[in-house]
Structures are given as structure tokens and as C-alpha cells.
Image (cartoon, helix red, strand yellow):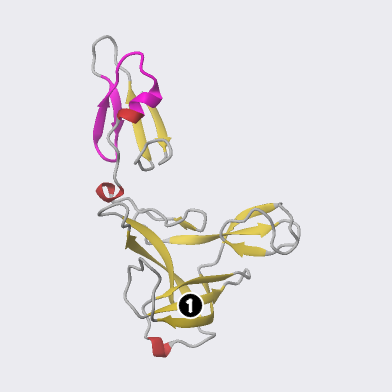
Amino acid sequence: MLLMRITQKTLTGGITGRITLTRGAGTVNSGAYCEVCNRLTPYRGGSKLRSVFQMMPPCRLGELHVPVSVDERCLRLSSEDGSQGTLLGMRCQECGVVVFGPATFCQSCTSPRLEQIELATEGILYSYTIVRVPPPGWPGPVPYVLGEVELPEGPHVLAEVVDCQQGALRVGIPMTLALQPVAMPEVPDSERVVYKWRPA
């Protein structure tokens, strides 16, 4: 028995999950079994492992109910239900400047020597605005509040502000990270976890 992890890049339409490949002897049935979606694909002698994976029915995020980060370069989930996680950033090993999200070089000194770090889940409301005309495809209610929060490490993170009356917001109040699932139009009955802000 061979246990291995696969990613969406391995299976067309697939999702990260554990795949158990069982090779039998002689005419004993064998196959690739997905423990996540409970599907078995028969294994034919001489077939390459990759071809077995390609024959497997595609896993659907909605069927699996597995929380997925909206962008793993910016948000790392730390709980099975997707309710907890941390923001990610890059810190320059030369000058120490920290930015939110991915980067290939330092925006301050242009050094390519960067390291990924976890950012704080709390910060200070630096600025905010009320959005009355949303961008195309906006899934939430309108109007909504878009807040810019300054983190202790230095970067500013822009995201929707939730669980707060618009009139109660003030620049300088403490904010905390809030994770919420949002429907994915491209994959029916599925969700991705996005980061938002709420007053602490």
C-alpha cells in the first residue's frame, strides 16, 4: 500500500487529499482510492500511477466541504473548519521591511533575499471608505465598508469590515482578523475562505 498526498495540479478538477493506491496480486482487484470523496478507480496492471490518477472522477470542492484559502500565498488556514488562520507576508533579510502577500524582491532596497513570515491577526484601522458601487461579481451586500488596517509589522491590509455599524467606525480603533467562507461561482456549491476585518 502506498500513501501519498496530491494537489489540484496533480488531478484535473481535483483537490488536495490523501490517495491510497493498493496493488493486488494476480487478478485481485486493485485501484486508486480517494479517502476524501470515497471513490475508487480500478488499477490495470502495467498502468502508470499518473494514468490511474487521470482516470479518477474529479473531486469537487463543494462535495468535499473542505475549507480552502482564497489565496494560500496570503492566508494560511490553521483549523479544519476554516475558522482560524493567519495572514502571510514577506520580510526582507537585508533591510527588514515587511510586506503583505507574495513578493519576489524588496520594495524598499530591491534585495531578492526575502523570507515568508506569519503576520499579526490584529491591527489598527488606518483608513476606511463606504463602497456604494461594487466591482463586477461582488458577492456581498451593498453598500459595504472597505477598511485599511495597519499591522504591527508595518504592512497595511485592505479588506471588507464586517460585524460593525458604519457609523461606529473610527480611525485608530483596534481591529481583528475575521475569516468567512464565500461561494465560488466557478465551482457550484463550493466555498473559499476569505479574510476580513472586524472591530476587536
Query: Does the image show residue 186?
Result: yes
Residue drawn where x is 71% and y is 62% of the image: 96
Q: Is residue 189 magenta?
A: no
Can you say which quadrant of the picture contains the C terminus? Answer: bottom left
Residue drawn where x is 43% and y is 65% of the image: 195
Res. 164 image quadrant:
bottom left
Secondary structure at badge 1 equals strand
Can you say which quadrant of the picture contains the N terminus? Answer: top left
Q: In the image, is residue 97 above or below residue 37? A: below
Q: Position of residue 120 (x, y in %)?
A: 54, 67
Q: Is residue 52 magenta?
A: yes
Q: Residue furthest bottom?
A: 167
Q: In the image, is residue 199 above or below residue 49? A: below
In the displayed structure, does residue 94 sit left or right of residue 27? right
Q: Position of residue 136 (x, y in %)?
A: 38, 68
Q: In the image, is residue 173 above or below residue 140? A: below
